[in-house]
Image: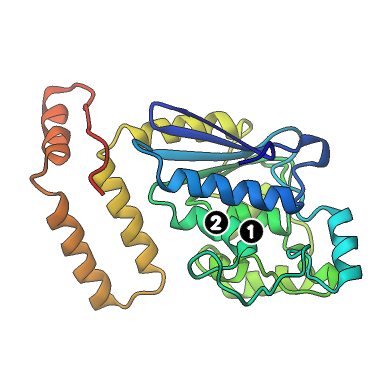
Amino acid sequence: MNDRVTIEIEAGVADVRLNRPDKMNALDPAMFQGIAAAIERLESEAGLRAVVLSGEGRAFCAGLDVSSFAKSAQAGGSTSNPDSSDIEERTHGDANLFQHVAWGWRTLPVPVIAAVHGVAFGGGFQIACGADIRITHPATRHAVMEMKWGLVPDMAGIAIMRSLARDDAIRELTYTHREFDGEEAARLGFATRLSDDPLAEAMKMAREIAGKNPDAVRGAKRLLNLSQDGDAPEVLLAESREQKAIIGKPNQIEAVMAGMAGRDPQFEDAAR
């Protein structure tokens, strides 16, 4: 990792922060690499229960760094591809690097909660959408910005947005690149809930999730991810398989015993 992203982990909750406050956490090549490295670390972090993703300073993420865009345009690259590499190459599973910094939060094994404030434009908006849950300040400025530069959203935005909002709303925001605030984001489905202190509320929620059976939480995320594209028979079978792998195991028994005794559960690290 580099200094563009910081991670602090306590009691199973990772506090991940985009750390370029002087540029409103705008995306330059180092930020792309820093986010990808953070996701890679979290994928294998023992004992991880939940992640909170936020931005230092005045904004969540202002999108692509303008100076990187200028250099990219001169080199024939795209807004999310400052180094002009072949974006059709799948370098991170189903995604390229630039898609991975948004899509990777969706594929992490634990829930990711984004605390969104200030600005979430372009690539920053797509990164926020990659989280499982978004706690958003009402005054946050959002935009699907790519059309401003004559381009399409190419950081997994299309794959992610379809699960959050109506098709016609996504099309209108994409075609016009108009700004919308947190209140409209909540109405459309891009914000889970509004808060005057998104980071504090996101951390509170993450700690609550961290207190649940980690096997069940991870299994639920796998099922919810599958439900986006899987057909009903596939999802029904997956439900049964996840439940079979959890029920009667130590963490599930501990959840029942703690609930009956009115005490906090003591879970072991997730089995898978």
On screen, 197 above or below 114? Answer: above
- Residue occupying the point 38% across, 38% down: 48
Name the residue type under label 1: Gln
Which label number is shown at residue 126?
1
Q: Is residue 65 visible?
A: yes
Name the element at disc 1: helix
Instruction: Quarter of the image for the N terminus: give it.
Output: top right
On screen, 172 above or below 47? Answer: below
- Residue occupying the point 43% across, 35% down: 206
The image quarter containing residue 21 is top right
Left or right of 118: which side holds 136?
Answer: left
- Residue occupying the point 47% across, 51% down: 132
Label 2 sits on residue: 130
Contact check, label 2 and label 1, Cβ < 8 Å: yes
Exactly how many numbered labels are in the figure? 2
Left or right of 163: which side holds 48?
Answer: left
Residue 140 % position (x, y): 71, 44
Which label number is shown at residue 27?
none
How far, Cα to Cα, is label 2 from label 1? 6 Å
Name the residue type under label 2: Gly
- Residue occupying the point 23% across, 66% down: 238
